[in-house]
Image (spheres, rainbow, N blue to C red):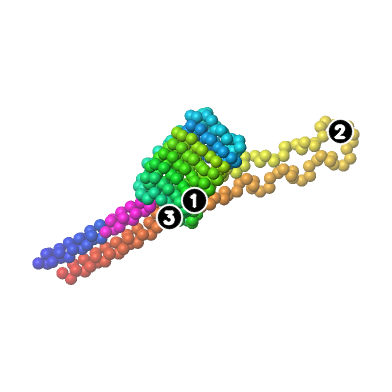
Amino acid sequence: MTVTTSRRPRRAVLAALATIAAGVTATAVLILSGTGASAAEAPVGLGTAANFSVLAGSTVTNTGATFLEQSLGVSPGNTAPGFPPGTVGGEIHLGDAVALQAKNDLTTAYNDAAGRTPFTVLPAELGGTTLTPGVYRLAAAQLTGQLTLDTQGDPAAVFIFQIESTLTTASNSSVVFINGASPCNVYWQVGSSATIGTGTQFVGNILAQTSITMTTGATLQGRALAQTGAVTLDTNTITTPACLQPTGTPTTGTPTATPTATPTATPTATPTATPTGTPTGTPTGTPTGQPTGTPTGQPTGTPTGQPTPSRTKLPVTGGSGGSTLVPVLTGVGSLAVATGAALLTLLHRRRRTS
């Protein structure tokens, strides 16, 4: 009877310990999977197409005083009538190897944006809505009024719009940011053609399969990139989108301002004013060319080119939770250990009494 009685509590304790272990494991899995699901969307790599304000397949035409902050390119076409009066802040590449490479990079970027998942399906009208970072799919897109993009305080926030057919904006429509802004991380992948209405203030990189038309006075903080057709402009301004996060991984080693081993201002060993040979006359006193004290070119202390680089600390996208995960798992583990110890103590007491 004694043996039978002592085994039952022992089995009950072991079963309780197994239940606690299973609970701890399940909690850890939930925490890990939850953090992984919240990873931020990565930007779409534009390659050399990022150097162009306008890129077209057949031609670029312009009317009026259009201004392009970056380059203009056409491939396989080779014409861009209307420049001047339009002005280009970068370079013009018509049917050359540079334009061809940019077009190839555009195709890669277009396919990347079109294939992003998971996505949220939206109705056609974007006006009057506020969206948070993510991937959105529309059969066709219409913007009337204002579209608000809420970056939720993340300057690296990414917005990707997958539009199966056309993108059209009404006159004087706009895209605005709240809670931080990074226009270079907004992408409009358009299955056919895009038309930006008169006076519209638009934002983002337009990646169109066919053509892009910007009507009178429309502005774009971004890029108008068309794969096969034309880009048509009329007194427009296209400026480079501000990227608040470096496009590549910042180096943490030696900053770019690191000076060379020997400061360029180091004076030569012999002052240039030292007289050569025997002076023609007897010099009086100390020669005026003799440097006094330390040469003025000698750098003092640490070279000024060795500053600690000033870099804005940005949130890491795609992270796994970091500091939040460690204390949660530590707490769960501590609870399991404490409960297990209590149950083992109970087991020993019962064995003694029996």
Q: Residues within 10 Å of mark 2 (few under 14, many from 20)?
A: few
- In this rendering, position of residue 282 left or right of residue 302: right
Eye-nearest disc, 3 or 1: 1
* Mark closest to the chain's N terminus, 3 or 1: 3
Residue stretch in magenta: 23-39
The x, y position of residue 186, in whole percent, is: 46, 47
Q: Secondary structure at mark 2?
A: loop
Eye-nearest disc, 2 or 3: 3
Could you tell me which residue is drawn at 47 percent across and 39 percent down? 212
Q: Is residue 241 visible?
A: no
Which SS type dominates the magenta stretch? helix
Q: On residue 191, which mark appears?
A: none
Q: On residue 129, which mark appears?
A: 3
Label 2, label 3: how many angstroms apart (C-alpha)? Answer: 87 Å
- In this rendering, position of residue 123 left or right of residue 250: left
The x, y position of residue 276, in whole percent, is: 81, 32
Residue 350, by quadrant, is: bottom left
Q: Is residue 285 visible?
A: yes
Above or below for 75 versus 114: above
Residue 2, by quadrant, is: bottom left
Q: Which residue is mark 2?
A: 279
* Mark closest to the chain's N terminus, 2 or 3: 3
